[in-house]
Image (cartoon, helix red, strand yellow):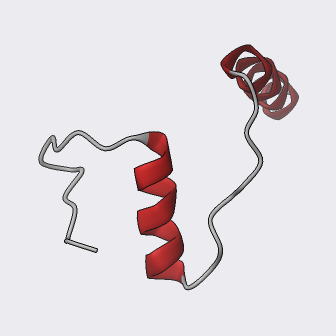
Amino acid sequence: MKPTNIVLGETVTVKGLFDLLSDLAGLKAPTIKLPVPVLRALALDASLQNAY
């Protein structure tokens, strides 16, 4: 895998980012695929729970 520098603006897909992070951490990348609206709802819920 070639070095990827996302800080300097290189375009990286979410899968590519998770693959990079899993390589760096030595862990398996997530394999569950969810629709974007479901992920947004989960993120909103997590955000609201942390707000209080």
Name the one closer to the observer, 49 or 32: 32
- Tell me the residue at 48%/63% (across/down): 19
Is 36 above or below relative to 46? Answer: above
Q: Quadrant of the C terminus?
A: top right
Residue 12 relative to residue 44: left or right: left
Vertical side of 44 occupied by 13: above or below: below
Name the image quarter holding residue 31: bottom right
Q: Name the residue rendered at 46%, 77% in the picture.
A: 23
Quadrant into which the N terminus falls? bottom left
Q: Residue at x 69, y 58 (%)?
A: 30
List x then y, in percent, for residue 51: 78, 26
Image location (x, y in percent) of residue 7: 20, 50
Query: Residue at 44% across / 79% down in the picture?
Result: 24
| Left or right: residue 49 compared with residue 30 | right
Q: Residue furthest top?
A: 37
- Closest to the observer, 51 or 47: 47
